[in-house]
Structures are given as structure tokens and as C-alpha cells.
Image: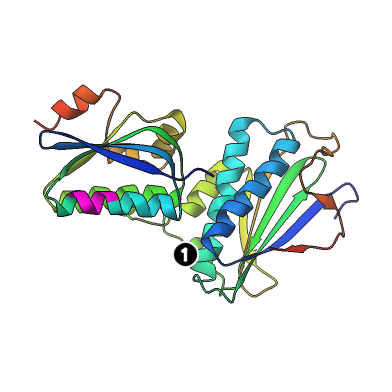
Amino acid sequence: MAPETKHLEVTLETHVESVNLAEEMCLRVAEAAGFSEDECYRIGMSVREGVINAFHYGNQEKPDKKIHLGIDLTTDKMVIHVTDEGKGFLLSDVPDPLAEENLLSTSGRGIFLMRTFMDEFNVVPGRTGGAEIIMSKKLPFPGEPPSNGNNGATKSGSPHQEV
Amino acid sequence: MPALYATAREDGVITVVDLSGRIALGEGSALLRKTIRDLLDRGRNKIILNLGDVTYIDSSGIGEMVSGFTAVRNRQGELKLLHLTKKVHDLLQITKLFTVFDVYSDEGTAVRSFQ
């Protein structure tokens, strides 16, 4: 991690309220980083969908499992990591929600929304054995140091919080 | 974050449900599901969801709207949408659900479309 990177890491309970909490935290960081209202909406929605994915599909709503949220704010982008404690999955196995036969499906749009709203998106095996979603958005003013506003982000290497 | 509020109005055989707040995972999605299910249980199967004051919909909310659409259709009814905000409009467009739902910007036109 580059020395200019600010890093925030929290461990969330597998609970519906964690979805709102993760969204609110990332929105604060995004706002402090100078993203526009529309971009904040896209980032917030993507974080929300990532945590819903971890809550529902990864951890299968089991309260003994945790959701790990990490935010890196570098000089040129905001990177978000959402890791569950499930069995992991392959992006190639996720059905296309825009396919005619899936249009009336009641689920399966979260991955699509994250891919659409973020600049970079990937899913890799996480350190917990589950899936780790990694997604990023370029900063509106790359090269400038991230804001020191009241965004909750701390310097790299600070202890992580448990929520 | 604000919850979802739902108020149903009846216009003959048509029910207009005024929604405000967030249709998202948790209470918002659950309230939308219950509202549609209660209407269907009362035989009200011509439904307009007025989304004019809905500020946010996530994938769970989208799923609940699709579920409602299918449930109403299975009871030989129709579920239509009214007054989409720009964010909701864009969301339905990128998920191609604009091609599934009947969407109106005027309540009178939406009501008459059932005849």
C-alpha cells in the first residue's frame, strides 16, 4: 500500500443493518474525497449491493459469520473491498440479469449494478475463504491528497474497528 | 435512513399506492411486499405504484417490484408505475425493466390505461 493511502477497515455483523452502515460509511469517505452527488450515489449503491451479496449469498444470513469492509483512498482512486465468510463464487457463474429469460427474476442484479456503477470491479478468493469483491472509482481530482475531513478514514496501518 | 411509507387510495376498481422513502433491503422491501399482498387478498388486482416520492431503490427493492408485478399478473391483474424520479427511471432503464413495466408520468393517463 502506498504511503499516501488512507485505509479504513471494519468488521460488520451479518445483519440487515450492516448494509445501511456500510453504505453510510463509504458515503462519508466519498463525500470527503470530493465525489459529486451522482458519483456518491453510485458508490453508495455499489457498497450496498456488495454487502447485500455478502450478507445473503456469501454468509447466507448466518449470524456467526462476519462481513469485512475495507476502504482504501489513494491519490487517484477510492478502492472498496467487501469480503464474506462463505464459499466464494465465480463471476462467470453469475447469470446475466439483462437476458430475456432473467428479466423477471426477483434477484441477481447486484453484481450487474456494481459493475455498471464502478470503474473497476472484480471478485477474487478472500483471505477468509469466501469471496472478496474489489471495486474502485477514480477520484474526481486525481493527484491531490485525500481530504482530511471528518470521514472516519485513518492512516494506513491503524487498528481496524469491529462493529 | 428514512423508511418507506405506503398509503393506498381507491379509484373504482383501481388502487393507487402512494409510496415515499426508500424501497431497499429490510423494512422497505417488506412493506412493499405486504402492501401488494394485502391488496391482492382483498381482490384489488389493478394497482398503480406512485413512486414520485421514492428517493432510492436497491436491487432488493427492484426484486420486490418484479415479484409484485408477477404476483399481480398471476391474479389476472396489472401493476403499473407512476411518477418515476430520475434515479429510479435510470435504474429501470439500465436493468431493462422499462421494457417490462408500464410506466406513466400522469395519473389520469395511468388510470385510464386499465380500461
Magenta stretch bounds: B35-39
- Residue under pointer 1: A93
A126 lies left or right of A94: right
Relative vertical location of residue A23 with respect to residue B85 in this rendering, above or below? below
Magenta part mainly helix, strand or loop? helix
Q: Nearer the viewer, residue A137 or A146?
A: A146
Name the amino acid, label 1. Answer: Asp
Which residue corresponds to the image point at 67% horizontal and 74% vertical from the top-left? A128
Residue A85 percent location from the top left of the image: 61, 73
Up-down relation of residue A82 to residue B59 (above or below): below
Task: Confirm whether residue A99 shows in the render.
Answer: no
Please determine whether, in this image, residue B100 is positioned above or below residue A83: above
The answer to which image quadrant residue B34 occupies is bottom left
Question: Is A67 included in the stretch rendered in magenta?
Answer: no
Q: Is residue B37 magenta?
A: yes
Question: Tag 1's secondary structure?
Answer: helix
